[in-house]
Structure formats: C-alpha cells, structure tokens
Image (cartoon, grey):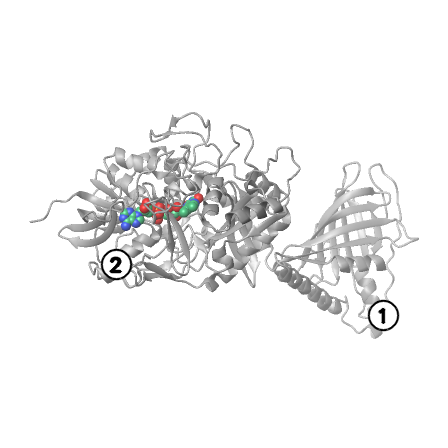
Amino acid sequence: MTERMDADVIVIGSGFGGAVAAARLAQAGHAVLVLERGGRWRPGDFPRDPDLRKGWLWQAGGGLYDIRWLDRMASVQAAGWGGGSLVYANVFARPADGALDPRWPAHLRREALDPYYDLAAHMLEVAPTGPDPRTGRVPERTALVEDLAARSDIVEATMRPNLAVTFGDPEQWRPNRHGVPRRGCAFVGECVLGCNHGAKNTLDHNYLAVAEAAGARAVTDAQAERIEPCDGGYDVHASTPSDPEAPERRWRAGKVVLAAGAIATTELLLRARDVHRTLPGLSRRLGHGFSGNGDFLTMAELRRRTGDAADTGDMTTGPTITTTTVLDVPEGRESVWYQVQDGAVPMPLRELIDSVIPGRRLRARWRRIRGTDRRRGFAVLAMGRDSSDGVLRLGDDGNAVLSWRTRWQAKLHRSQSRVGPLLARQFGARMSNPPTWSLLRRTVTVHALGGVPEGEGPETGVVDEYGEVHGHPGLFVMDGSRLPAATGVNPSASILAVAERSVEAMIRRSGRTGWRAPEWDDVAPAPVPEDAAFDFMAERRAATAGDGVGFGERMRTPRRRAPVADLRLSARIRSMDRFLADPAHPIAVRGRIDVEGVVTGADVAGTLSLFPEGRPEAMSYALTFRDGDGRDWKLSGEKTVRSRTPVALLRGLTTLHTRIRPAEGGPEEGVTAVVTIGLPELLSLGASIRGQGFTRARRLRAAARFAAFFAKSALRSTDDPAPPARRPPTRPQSDAVRPLRSRPGGVKVDVQCSAGTEGDGHGFR
Ligand SMILES: Cc1cc2nc3c(=O)[nH]c(=O)nc-3n(C[C@H](O)[C@H](O)[C@H](O)COP(=O)(O)OP(=O)(O)OC[C@H]3O[C@@H](n4cnc5c(N)ncnc54)[C@H](O)[C@@H]3O)c2cc1C
C-alpha cells in the first residue's frame, strides 16, 4: 500500500530558486512543503555584535553566514528563510548575451528569458539608488564613482543598477506589492549584514510571503541529508541543525525540488549517487561546470578629501552597491570583460574583523599614525566570465571540494587586479587584496554557480532544460547550480528567471497546461540599465581593437607666403586594427585653425587619410570649420611625395597644399594655401606620438605598430613609381592667393588646385 504523502512537492532550500518554486507551485494549487536548514530573520534580528559566536556563522551555532573552504576557493553564502537574499547586496542584473559563455543555450539567453526577468523584477520591486531622502544627495561613494566616470572617456559604461530595495520615507512602514510592510532605505550601508531597518526586498517579503499566503508550509531548522526514491515519489530525510541529537525526520512527496544553492545541492546529489547510493544513475557530469563567477575583491582606503564641502568622507552610506561599471579591457591578444561595483564596508563588519584578527591594538595605533579613517574605506567588487570549469566532488569528510585552477582565470584576474592601482592613482587611495588572494592566490566567491549541468541525456547533463533530473522523474533542480556557466554579473536575477521558466513548465507538465503566474497581467517590461553599458563597451571594444594612437601636429604657412594659415591638430586613432584594415587609413583630427582673411582661431575637425591605398597622395585632409559669421567652410588638402630621395620625402610628408572654400559657395570662391611642418614642429610631432591602451605594454605596442606602418608606407609613397633620376622635373605648386573679386561674407579667390584628385578620398567632398 502506498504510504501517505506529506505534500505534493517538497522544496529543499528557500533561496532564490526555492522561493520561486514554492510560490508558483503553491499558487498552482499544489501542497508545498519547504525545508530550510536556517531560521527566520526579521528586521532587528540580524547580528551586529563584534563577537563571531553571536549569530554570525552558520558553523558556530546556526548563524547567518555559511563560509565554506572548498580547498581551491572559498565561498560565502547565507543560511535562513530567504537564503542568499538575506545578506546579498540587492543587485538585480541581467547578463548581456554577447558576454556569455557559449555553453549558455538559446533557451536560457535573454530573448527567451527576458519576460521572466521582467516577472522577477516585478516581484522584487527593483529600482536604482536615488538620493537619500534625508540629505537630498546620492551617497558619497556613488558621487565619487560617477565623478570619476564623468572624467573618463567611458562615462556610458557606468550606471546605477536595479536594486531589490524599497526607497522612500525611511520612517514610514508601507505594504509592498505583496502586502508585506517595508520602510524606505535608511542609507546605512548594512545590506550585506542583513537589513535591520526593514528596507531590503528579501525573498521572505515577496516570493516566500506569496508562497505562504497560497498555503505553502515552511519547516525551518530542517536540513535535508538524504533523498531516496520511494513508491510514487521521494523521501527526504532531514536533521535538526539546532539539535544534533534530535532524531532524523522524514517527509514524503511525489516531487522534490532541490534548491539548496550550488554547493549544497551538488553535495546532496553527489551523496545520493556515491555515498547513500539512493540515486545511483545520476549523470557522471554531476559536479561539473562550477563557477565562482569571476569574483575578485579589492579594498580601497581613500586618503585625501575631495575638498568639496559636501564631502564628509563617509563611504559607508547608501545601499551596499550603488554603481556598476562595465569594462572591456585588452589583455594579451584578447579582450577581457568584467564589471566593477562599489561596495560599502559597514562599521559592524570592520569591528567584527577586528575582533577576530590578532594584534587589534597594534593595528589601531598604526591606523592612528597613518591617519586612516575607516569610514573612508570601501570595497571594489569585480566579477566576470571565469572558465566555469570547476569540478565539485566529495572529499574524505563527505563534504564538497573543488578542483579548480586559478591560472585558468589568469587573464581575468590580472585584468581585474589592475583596477586597484588605477583607482589608487585616481583617488589617491590605498588598495589591498584580502590575504586569501595576496598570500594564497585563492579567490572568495559570493556567487557560487553550476555543478548540475543540463544536457539532452545523462551522458551530457544531469537535468533537462527545465531542471528535471534525467532518469528520476519528479526530481527537479532550480537554483544557482543550474546555470551553465558564469553570468559575469550578479546572478540572482538569472537564478530567478531560470527558476520561473522551469517551474512554469513543471506545473504545465503536471496537467495544468497553459498555467501562468497570476502576476503576469501586472508585469511591465522593467528598465535594464546594464544593457546600455554593455552595448557601449561592446561598440567601444570594436572601435578600439588593437588599441589606439594619438599625436599632435602643427602646420603653418612658410614665411613670405600668403595667405598665412596656421593649423594645430590633434589626431586620434581609436583602433589600430580598424585603422590598418580600412584601405583609407582614416584618422579623426580636431584642433584650431587660422586663415588670413577667412577665420581667426576657429575649431576645426575632420579626417586625415594616411597613406590611402590606391591613391597618389601620401596624406589627404578633409576638415570643416565655421567662421566668425557662422559660415561653414571646408578645407581639403594633400601631401604628396614626388620622389624617394630623403629631401623629397621629407618635403612631401611635411607640406600640405590646401583648398579652403565655403561649404555652400560657388567653385570660384575660396583660397589656396600651403602649410608646412617646420623642424621644431616635426620634433614635437614625433614626441607627441602616444599609444593609447590599458597597459604600458599595450600602449607601446600600439605606438610601435603605428610607427612601423608609417615608416613602411612613407618609403613606398611616391605618386610615381619611376626612379627619381628619370623623372621629369615637376612644376612647383603655386600657393599664391589670387583674389578675383570680393563679396561680403567670404574671400573671393582664384582657386588653384594643388596635386591630388579633388572629390576623392575619405573625408568630406
Ligand atoms: C555577501 C553577498 C552578497 C551578494 N550580493 C548579491 C547581489 O547583489 N546580487 C546578486 O544577484 N547576488 C548576490 N549574491 C549572490 C546570491 O546571494 C546567490 O547567488 C544566491 O543566493 C543563490 O541562490 P540559490 O537559490 O542558488 O541559493 P541560496 O540563495 O543560497 O539558497 C539556498 C538555501 O538553501 C538552504 N539550504 C542549504 N542546504 C540545505 C539543506 N541541506 N537543507 C535545507 N536547506 C538547505 C540555505 O540555507 C539557503 O537558504 C550575494 C551573495 C553574498 C553572500
């Protein structure tokens, strides 16, 4: 006889995946039982005492943080009703498809998942950080980063991410969308310690509240230890973490959703396959594809004040994370992308760290001597696309250990570690890495992912595309372990979206075809600020491939010639790769121009085509400027090398014959002028050539490529391949100005064309 079921579905774990599963299954009318090893944490419960034994560590009396040493990496996660949301930094981010590993299948990419991201954003009521309602200003950390971004040429790469935080009046409790009271953020920067104020939109205030309202039963202090198939479903055996002597409990259900987090879920399945042998047929791929999401931590300690009266120097205010900057940095021959976020380091955490690291007094004295103000410290949190090739297996003690090579991520970490010195220069900050990195070369991840890969069958994956375990119908996996590789961005939104899609399919497969979450009708597509930052960096990556080069040049009319013109230009190649690949070899130039009788000190901009292929001239300029009367002018001109003798070469490369005429004038209007680069200007031109790139080596390489191109092209550049000796003498170009008649608004001149084919080239026509 079939034994009585305790529920239709048992959900193990109440983090992101578990909360979605519990809410949706309960809404769909299933009897749901949620087992959670930790307890409930309410505002005011979260630990603040600088004593490690007082509520901090899961391993020490069932505290909030579960810190695991996986041998090759450390991992931090939370234990409690709401899982990682209790301590997370609230960032709700979607990965850009272009940045994802090829292992991400189409059904987990943005096009397929965006509706589910929108649904999750609606459930969590996300919004970016705004000004603190009490001061009317954004947090100083935010201002610091945004100010730095504004001074850079990648301002569009910095944005304020969506946060699962309630903003508004910090004193007033108001019901959220799910009827649960929340207050506006108090900007105390303690999100990662658990929010004692009641402003974080943690899962217990949305998905889990919805689940319980729909009848889901929560059993906290119940740690699943063993899963075994039984008649019509599965038995889940659990211990009682608060009382190790308590007898094991057992619950039975037709279906089980595993959502204990990437490490614990993988561990439970590994034990079921290899130790308890209750699920011996689990795929050999189990444990594979583990990722630390490229997490890399740097600490910054600001030294000097900005001088702004509003600068109180306090970097601890605001939500934990307020900005994201997307970077795409050349590293070796490739480009490495990752993102960087500012992180508040709250004082209670500092005090806790102080209490556990020996030499407290000595360090306090050292800080006084150095004048360190600890409120001026903050974290720089980087994450990106790591190799996602880790393998979790059971160690001798029955717990997971990780096979991982830090050197697989060498490029990513090398690049991430350059951010510290860069900020140190910009902010005058002291930067440091945690000892786990500086001494042991081990990273600490707060974003453990993978371990339960999907595949079409057990040979290639543990689960199918909806998370159902191959060979074990009714057993599902719906947490971070399901993600096929790093998201490179904060992953909880992806875990939510994947779980929403999976549980919807699970409900539909159970007979309720066409079922959809009741909230869908109210969901509006949410803004995705990270997309613009990714798009900007993707375009910049293409536009700066191979790094860039910049230089300045000045050309003036030689003495005793007229009209006198003076051109001061700065030229910039953003991408040497693009520059070399384009047969016109175009360079953007801008600067100032004076032309006697036409304009004095006007801005000028346009293109210099350097050794354009298939063209007789060595350089062709196409510039525009506006005169004092608001009239637009065009300048076109060429430098032409007549022979390869050194003198002719030098003269050809330094003498520009120009035609300057109104943009909308007749062909008879305008002037011609000759400008040349004198010896002093030639020397400063050479000295001004600068490679542009993230590292010195990259800058040098870009400058060297440019120099090589210039030298090679210059030696090849004559407008006639005939040897110089046999060339007929060339008639010198006249640069005289021959005014024909004067008309108001411009100078009428007899236009004398210099060498070069007008109307050709790659600038204006
Ligand atoms: C300090 C910190 C800051 C973070 N900031 C962000 C952020 O800003 N944005 C973001 O997207 N992500 C952030 N993360 C990561 C995020 O919290 C995790 O990616 C996410 O929680 C993983 O979700 P999950 O469903 O896989 O598992 P979890 O949320 O970890 O949930 C697993 C749950 O299962 C329970 N459990 C484990 N084993 C058992 C068992 N045997 N029986 C019963 N219950 C069990 C655990 O107690 C836990 O409640 C942060 C993480 C940390 C630690």
Q: Residue furthest right?
A: 560
Disc 1: which residue = 728
Q: Quadrant of residue 723?
A: bottom right
Vertical arrangement, residue 535 with respect to residue 415, above or below: above
Q: Secondary structure at mark 1?
A: loop
Please rate how many residues cluster around mark 1, counting C-alpha atoms within 10 Å: few if below 14, some from 14 to 19, many from 20: few
- Within 8 Å: ligand 1 and the Cβ of disc 1? no
Q: Earlier in the sequence, mark 2 or mark 1?
A: 2
What is the number of callouts on the image? 2
Disc 2: which residue = 271
User: Which x, y percent locates residue 587?
Assistant: 69, 55
Pick the residue in front: 551 or 588. Answer: 551
Q: Secondary structure at mark 2?
A: helix
Say which amino acid is labelled 2. Answer: Arg
Vertical arrangement, residue 150 with respect to residue 284, above or below: above
Quick check: marks 2 and 1 in contact, CB under 8 Å?
Answer: no
606 left or right, relative to 164: right
Q: CA distance from mark 2 to mark 1?
A: 90 Å
User: Which x, y percent locates residue 321?
Assistant: 49, 42
**Which numbered mark, 2 or 1, is in the foreground of this view?**
2
User: Which x, y percent locates residue 707?
Assistant: 71, 64
Which residue is at a point 84% across and 74% down the rendered structure image?
A: 725
Q: Is residue 494 visible?
A: no
Say which amino acid is labelled 1. Answer: Pro
Q: Residue furthest top?
A: 172
User: Which x, y percent locates residue 520?
Assistant: 33, 36
Q: Is residue 628 visible?
A: yes
Q: Which disc, if any, is residue 226?
A: none
